[in-house]
Image: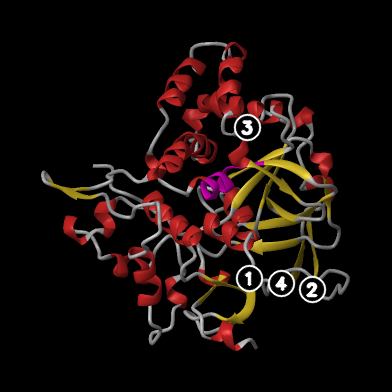
Amino acid sequence: MNTEIDNKALLCIDCIKDSKLRKYFLSQKTVKSVCTFCKTNNDYCLEFEENIDFINIIRALVRYHYWEDEYNHHFGGLRFYELITSENLIFHSERFVEDVDLDILTCGIEDCDGCKIELYYGHDDAGRWSYGRRIKDRRSSSLLALESKLLENNYFLLEKEFHKELKLFKQYFKSSVLKKSIFYRARIGYEKTVKNDDTIYDYMDDNSGLKYVPYSDDSISASPISRLSQGRLHRIGTSFLYLATDIETALTEVRPDPGHKVSIGCFKAIKKLKIADLDQAFIKLSKNEETLKKYIFINHIDQLLSRPVTSDERYMYLITQFFSDAFRKLGFDGIYFTSSVGPGQNLLIFNANNFKYIKNEANVYQINSLKYQYSNMK
């Protein structure tokens, strides 16, 4: 192994929790080495010391996920070191070994001289100030106005003005899915059961004496138009393919209950596709304070696309369908957007024929438990 690499601080991809940071990580030149923090061998390790872009993104992510009051002890929150080393939304801190020198990471983030993204608002003669709301909660004034108009006017009357504004941000979210890329799709239930001694099937055995055969092919692909009602991103009479970047996200997106058995199918892109990637926009705009302000517009769209909608709020589909139409009319084959329940991203594909179901790769999973996250609305 290269001695020069051995002497540098390296972070492996398995220590990263946030999907935006993972996406940046995979776009960089990584090395096969031992992670400084979890002490495991990994094919994807990144040197982060003096990596200004990397540290800018981490700082932006701290402000994306947290109010400054939560990580600035001057306002009664944790110290930054405590935030990073306890359970957090950016790193898998439970992987960090006890004797590792975490000052390499925390001081590097806090004390970076060349960074253009600030971690703390700072103070002046009037006193100490805070950034206040996390970036995740901030909204664009123009999009707030558009939301109201969409509930009062026919959507096609508002398209021209919005498309003009959306084009200004196209350079930041323009991305692609490569040919043969693999994604996942879930459906609650399974095709059938067979006796355990039938060796043709090799799926999950729950000690009941049965094997569960998953849904496959058309039964787990995009729903036929004749059976579709409206959905989050598709109007009545339109069939889109909803996928996920990983199995856990696919499972959680179908909202199963404990005890449910869920089929997972694998799908492969048959060609390179042009995708609007809202996570990539965050990476590209985490350069300085001015570019980060631009992300508020894209974040607003991402939050609307991923926001859980209850049965009595289905009118909100008028808004999310409008954004889906806009990306499609800009020439995109699909949209990457944040999952509100899973660790990865969702991928909406406008033409399901751009993906092929992979035979013999389906499985059935049983949901053993759920974890609820909640917040005080006071």
Real-space Cα separation, disc 4 to disc 3, in angstroms: 34 Å
Of the pair 139 and 116, the residue shown nearer to us: 116
Q: Residue at x 57, y 33 (%)?
A: 169
Q: Nearer the viewer, mark 1 or mark 2?
A: 1
- Quadrant in which residue 366 is drawn: bottom right
Residue named by callout 4: 205
Q: Give the residue type that dot 1 points to.
A: Thr
Nearest to N terminus: mark 1 or mark 3: 1
Q: Are marks 3 and 2 in contact (CB under 8 Å)?
A: no
Is 130 positioned to the left or the right of 354 in the image? left
Where residue 65 appears, as percent x and y from the top left, is 39, 52
Q: Residue at x 64, y 75 (%)?
A: 31
Q: Is residue 345 above or below residue 363?
A: above
The residue range painted magenta reads 276-284
Residue named by callout 2: 196
Q: Secondary structure at mark 4?
A: loop
Nearest to N terminus: mark 4 or mark 3: 4
Q: Are marks 4 and 2 in contact (CB under 8 Å)?
A: yes
Nearest to N terminus: mark 4 or mark 1: 1
Q: Is residue 310 above or below residue 209?
A: above
Label count reads: 4
Q: Secondary structure at mark 3?
A: loop
Real-space Cα separation, disc 4 to disc 2, in angstroms: 8 Å
Q: Nearer the viewer, mark 4 or mark 1?
A: 1
Residue named by callout 3: 231
